[in-house]
Image: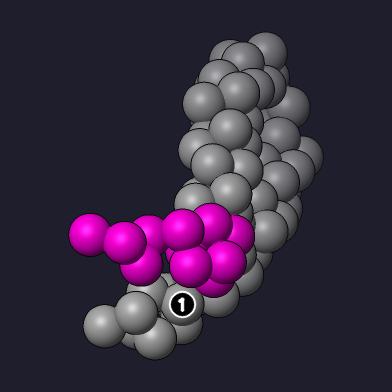
Amino acid sequence: MNQLKKYAGIIWILLGPISMYYLVQTAATQIIAKPGIDTKIQWAVFGIVFLPIALGLMIFGYYALKGEYDKI
């Protein structure tokens, strides 16, 4: 079970930057397609909310990889 937690930690560490990249890429294409202020505000709110969540996901994965969650 501890090995599974470590493998999941690797997945979470990789999932954080991938999801950040996807968010920024999608936001950029949407803002270019519709350059209105409402689109910019919407994606700014998404970024403000989601980027710390993705960062926390990477931190959580780091601790899982280190073995901090091995103790029950």
Q: Quadrant of the C terminus?
A: bottom left
Q: Is residue 45 visible?
A: yes
> What's under tag 1, amino acid-wise?
Lys
Residue closer to the observer: 35 or 18: 18
Q: Where, by quadrant of the figure, is residue 33 drawn?
A: top right
Q: Up-down: is 41 above or below 4?
A: above
Q: Residue at x 52, y 26 (%)?
A: 49
Q: Residue at x 46, y 77 (%)?
A: 6
Whole-percent x, y for residue 45 in the image = 56, 20
Is 1 left or right of 66, judged from the image as shown?
Answer: left
Provide the residue span drawn in magenta: 61-72
Whole-percent x, y for residue 14 in the image = 61, 70
Helix, strand or loop status at disc 1: helix
Q: Residue at x 58, y 33 (%)?
A: 52
Q: Is residue 26 visible?
A: no
Identify the residue under disc 1. Answer: 6
